[in-house]
Image (cartoon, rainbow, N blue to C red):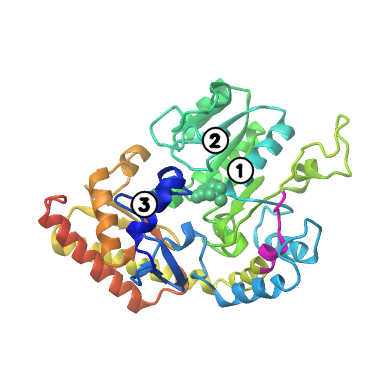
Amino acid sequence: MPSNQSLSDRARRIMPGGVSHELRYKAPHPVYIDRALGAEKWDVEGKRYIDFKLGAASQLLGNSCPEVMEAVARQLTKTPYSGDCHPLEIEWAEWIHRLVPSAERVRFTGSGSESTMLALRVARAHTRKDKVLRIDGHFHGWHDMLLKGSKPGTDRPPSLGVPQAISDLTAVAPPDLEAIAERLDRDPGIGSIFVEASGANYGSVPLPDGFLPAIRAMADELDKVLIFDEVITGFRWSPGGRQARDGVVPDLTTLAKVVTGGLPGGALAGKAHIMALLDPSRTVEGLAPAVSHKGTFNAAPMVAAGAVAAMRLLSTGEVQAQADAMAARLREGVNAAFARRGIKALAYGDSSTCHLYFGSTAIEGLSAQRIRTATPALVQGLRSGLLARGVDFMSFTSCVTSNTHTPALIDEAVGIFDAVLGDLTEAGAIAA
Ligand SMILES: Cc1ncc(COP(=O)(O)O)c(C=O)c1O
């Protein structure tokens, strides 16, 4: 088997930066994963990692979940994809309807970014208002329409190539109800509000207490379409996502990652009267459907088969309870390591997440910018150190757990984490 380095050299000759996703770039080279099972994975050199990236948070059931794999394999003997309607997409939509409170109707998409794009088009068609308000630092995918504001503390998209005219349609506000009310008041052209239901970056910047019910009330009062991005929180925070756990129902919900059982795809769910705009049997102003939406691989049978198998497992809450318990154990272990070493830092997080903040043992009152931009050199050192010792954290300083993590794996990971803290302290990267 070729080495990680030789694969990276080869990749860089044919793919920009050698990667298919900018966050997979790593100097001197990324690791090339050969196989993954449960909470572990192995690279092409045979090195084993305890996995807290879990398919960019898509594998809540652990890598290569047997039930999902079997369902996909069964479907492959019939057809992976034919471009037709098929029974499994109905079963999948019915599961989402049963579990997610806002999901009166469901439309499948090709990814989370496509779900947020579609949500915005549907919201614009419903309100007849082109502008959207989004929260500073929240992430809603890589497309033009919601890119401005995804990098906290900046008022420009973190990319060239996004037309100014598109960015001008996006208003960015902090997760502060007064500031949001003031912005909405100042600009009556804003028709919809987009919120990552966990707070920025799956909760690395948590929303203030009471934010979700308050923004729901504000949207009702001002007649705005409220959209929860539950691409990460969906089926993870509870079988019905953050909205079911907290009892706050948005008008539209964007889903991906766990909703597909960790396979490629996504969904938009929402109130029937708004989603009706997608119904080709209805004509509005000479258009049928009123809102156009296509997508070759939407609800591909192979994906739907895996997703239905996943929905069965996700519906009881047991998966989430185990993943949550393992994340709590990880946070506790890491905080104990910080305390033992006298490092001023905090491991925190909701549901099955763990985020790190260096510089203080509390994050209350800190801005998104402050939390997300904690010393890049340290973040780089930490991630690389963990990877070298066999733990894969996700990007920035955050990670997720699955129901396949066990106390033994968590304790092993905490031990590795502690050793990396030791390395970084010795190298002067962390002040003890
Ligand atoms: C909250 C949120 N919304 C949208 C997306 C975009 O999803 P995708 O990468 O499937 O396009 C992501 C991806 O990480 C996400 O975390």
Tell me which amino acid carries mark 3.
Answer: Asp
Percent x, y for residue 99?
65, 63
Residue marked by disc 3:
9
Question: How far is the residue under mark 3 from the one under mark 1?
Answer: 35 Å
Ligand 1 under 8 Å from disc 1 Cβ: yes
Residue marked by disc 1:
116
Percent x, y for residue 245?
55, 59
* Circle nearer the viewer, 2 or 3: 3
Residue 119's place in the image compared with 246, above or below, is above
Looking at the image, which residue is at 56% across and 63% down? 262
Label 2 element class? helix
Locate the C terminus and report the quarter of the image it occupies.
bottom left
Residue 376's place in the image compared with 264, above or below, is above
Tell me which amino acid carries mark 2.
Answer: Leu
Mark 1 or mark 2: whose residue is earlier in sequence: 1
Looking at the image, which residue is at 30% across and 67% down? 390
Asked whether, in this view, residue 142 is left or right of residue 421, the answer is right
Q: Nearer the viewer, residue 429 or 149?
A: 429
Percent x, y for residue 410?
33, 72
Mark 3 or mark 1: whose residue is earlier in sequence: 3
Asked whether, in this view, residue 350 is left or right of residue 293, the answer is left
Residue 79's place in the image compared with 172, above or below, is below
Q: Nearer the viewer, residue 337 or 180?
A: 337
Locate the N terminus and report the quarter of the image it occupies.
bottom left
